[in-house]
Image (tube, helix red, strand yellow):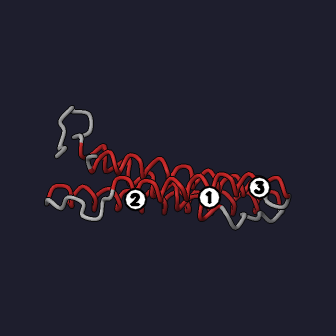
Amino acid sequence: MTFNRYIAFRMITELIGAAACITQVYYNNNLNGIIITGVIALVWILGEIWTVIVFNRANPRTDELSDMHQYSAYRFAMLTLVIALTIIGFAGMLYTLVTRVPIEVGPMVLPSLAMLALAIADARYLWLEHDGTSGGDDED
């Protein structure tokens, strides 16, 4: 199993975790929502454990280009998360000013965005490792 495949599997499990958080945003106060979220979260937890145990990536590769790509990917994800939070906050403020109705953001929105940011970081890393659109590949 290559490191890039490990990152791809990790990205998929992070997307499942984000789906669990988003499900709880929409089904916040009823038993069905908690059950659905619990099932999705269980799949996410099992996926994370399976990815770590089966692929055993205790010592990922550490060449300079890969490290630079990981740094760039996480910086990109952090910037994306900050932009998303700014847009949500600004839109909520404008909505409140126009309608005079306060807006509430559910407590699971932030964990949902954080899980999506992790998945975005992994996707960006894989894109950088494959040289974007030029078709190159930096695989071991």
| CA–CA distance in space, label 2 to label 3 | 26 Å
The residue under label 2 is which amino acid type? Answer: Val
The residue under label 1 is which amino acid type? Answer: Ile
Using residue 3 as the reference point, say whether residue 140 is left or right of it.
left
Query: Which tag, 1 or 2, sits closer to the chain's start?
Result: 2
Identify the image quadrant of residue 77. Answer: bottom left
SS at circle 3: helix
| CA–CA distance in space, label 1 to label 2 | 34 Å
Nearest to the observer: residue 36 or residue 95: 36
Query: Which tag, 2 or 3, sits closer to the chain's start?
Result: 3
The residue indicated by pointer 1 is 88
| CA–CA distance in space, label 1 to label 3 | 28 Å
| Residue for point 42% across, 62% down | 78
Q: Residue 90, percent across and down?
A: 62, 61
| Residue for point 20% across, 55% down | 66
Nearest to the observer: residue 51 or residue 108: 51
SS at circle 1: helix
Query: Which tag, 1 or 3, sits closer to the chain's start?
Result: 3
Q: Which mark lies nearer to you, 1 or 3?
A: 3
The residue indicated by pointer 3 is 35
| Residue for point 50% across, 53% down | 47
